[in-house]
Image (spheres, rainbow, N blue to C red):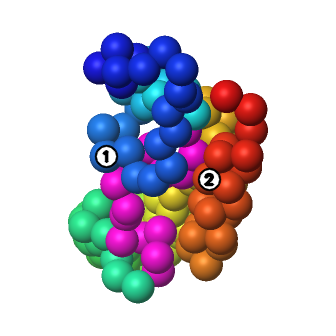
Amino acid sequence: MLRCLSHQHAFCLSGKWHLGLNCESASNHCHHPLHHGFDYFYRMPLSMMGNCTHWELLEKSVDLEKKLNFLFQVLALVMLTLAAGKLMHLISISWMPVIWSALLAVFLLTTSYFVGALIVHADCFLMRNHTITEQPMRFQRVTPLTLQEVKSFLKRPA
């Protein structure tokens, strides 16, 4: 639609593009602004996530952390039950299931601790056209960088 309005002007989108990027693969970028009439794009291709601002936890990470913590608790309980049964000679198993359940429990606990940072790294980034310019984005720099990009776009020849 923008292309039909004018053949003399370039169109820039500098802001949040709430439609995301991809359709069927990570590289097709079928929803990217450059495929919808814009000649230049700078900023976030996703909605502003709560995790990007570090002011509030996003539902996605909170839900994932809860699930990982629950699995950790179940595995820790299994490990303690197996260890207690083995030590009191109530069950005759090798120590391998106890060791593996302990290692898996530690892995889940560690993963749940870092899941918020992983989601921020994956979801919070700035793009210039099809190139990621900052990941994870630093929220304090977004406005000055955006203004600088718009200023550069306006100064370039038509």
Decide: is 130 above or below 103: above
The answer to which of 111 and 142 lies nearer the viewer is 142
Dot in front, 1 or 2: 2
Q: For residue 10, what is the image quadrant?
A: top right
Quadrant in which the N terminus is drawn = top left
Q: Check disc 2 and give the amino acid type.
A: Val
Decide: is 123 above or below 48: above
Q: Position of residue 100 (x, y in %)?
A: 51, 56
Residue 47 highlighted magenta (yes or no): yes
Identify the disc placed on residue 150.
2
Q: Which residue position holds label 1?
A: 18
Which structural element holds mark 1? loop
Residue at image position (62%, 53%) is: 150
Identify the disc placed on residue 40.
none
Does residue 133 appear in this view? Answer: no
Q: Check disc 1 and give the amino acid type.
A: His
Q: Position of residue 6 (x, y in %)?
A: 42, 20
Quadrant in which the C terminus is drawn = top right
Q: Position of residue 55 (x, y in %)?
A: 41, 85
Q: Is the residue under label 2 in contact with that under label 1 (CB below 8 Å)?
A: no
Residue at image position (47%, 28%) is: 38
Of callouts 1 and 2, which one flags the residue occurring earlier in the amino acid sequence? Answer: 1
The answer to which of 81 and 146 lies nearer the viewer is 146
Does 94 sit left or right of 22 as displayed? right
**Real-space Cα distance between discs 1 and 2?**
19 Å
| Span highlighted in magenta in the image | 41-54
Mark 1 surroundings within 10 Å by alpha-carbon count, few (fewer than 14), some (14 through 19), many (20 or more): few
